[in-house]
Amino acid sequence: MSDEEHHFESKADAGASKTYPQQAGAIRKNGYIVIKARPCKVVEVSTSKTGKHGHAKCHFVGIDIFNGKKLEDIVPSSHNCDVPHVTRTDYQLIDISEDGFVSLLTDSGGTKDDLRLPTDDNLLTQIKDGFAEGKDLVVTVMTAMGEEQICALKDIGPKN
């Protein structure tokens, strides 16, 4: 046997999958689904009856949760679809940098500096105005399939 050391480049995370399978017939409106490799919120589901030899089919209409684009997919109801793990986390806003990144305070007391300001103009002006007025703001960050985006804002009162 050779006694040279083997080096493996680890590119994997803790083995947690970005999605999980769910039967197409069990996915409902306001749920989540992966369409064309994008995490989407289901806004419409319609099921067609079986044909002479076929499966019942589910027609999904979903809105991409990060860019708002409308996507559609048709899947046999007995087949599995990918459903993204969607999590929401609240962070306190500490600072907004000139290049469009925000500095957020995590629960453990550390900072998170790798998030951009949201692209939604309404939310963007609320965050900038509230921060300029010196309010204590808590932003909600939605995470799915390795992407993160600020999706909501809460005002917890003026800074002391």
Image (cartoon, rainbow, N blue to C red):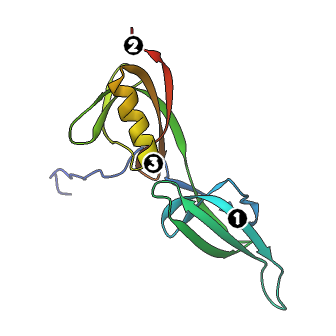
Residue 85, x across and y down, in percent: 55, 49
Residue 39, x across and y down, in percent: 52, 58
Q: Is residue 25 left or right of residue 40?
A: right
Q: Residue furthest left?
A: 4
The answer to which of marks 2 and 3 sits earlier in the sequence is 3
Kindly tell me whether residue 30 is visible in this rendering: yes
The kind of residue tagged 2 is Lys
Residue 160 versus residue 33 in the image, above or below: above
Instruction: Give the residue displayed 32% in from the left and 26% down from the top.
Output: 132
Q: Name the residue tied to disc 3.
A: 15
For the residue labelled by badge 1, is the local secondary structure a helix, a strand or a loop?
A: strand
Q: Is residue 102 left or right of residue 19?
A: left
Q: Nearer the viewer, residue 18 or 133?
A: 133
Q: Name the residue tied to disc 1.
A: 44
Q: Split into 4 quadrants, where in the image is the C terminus?
A: top left
Q: CA gap, disc 2 to disc 3? A: 41 Å
Q: Name the residue tied to disc 2.
A: 159
Residue 76 versus residue 100 in the image, above or below: below
Residue 19, x across and y down, in percent: 54, 55
Q: How many marks?
A: 3
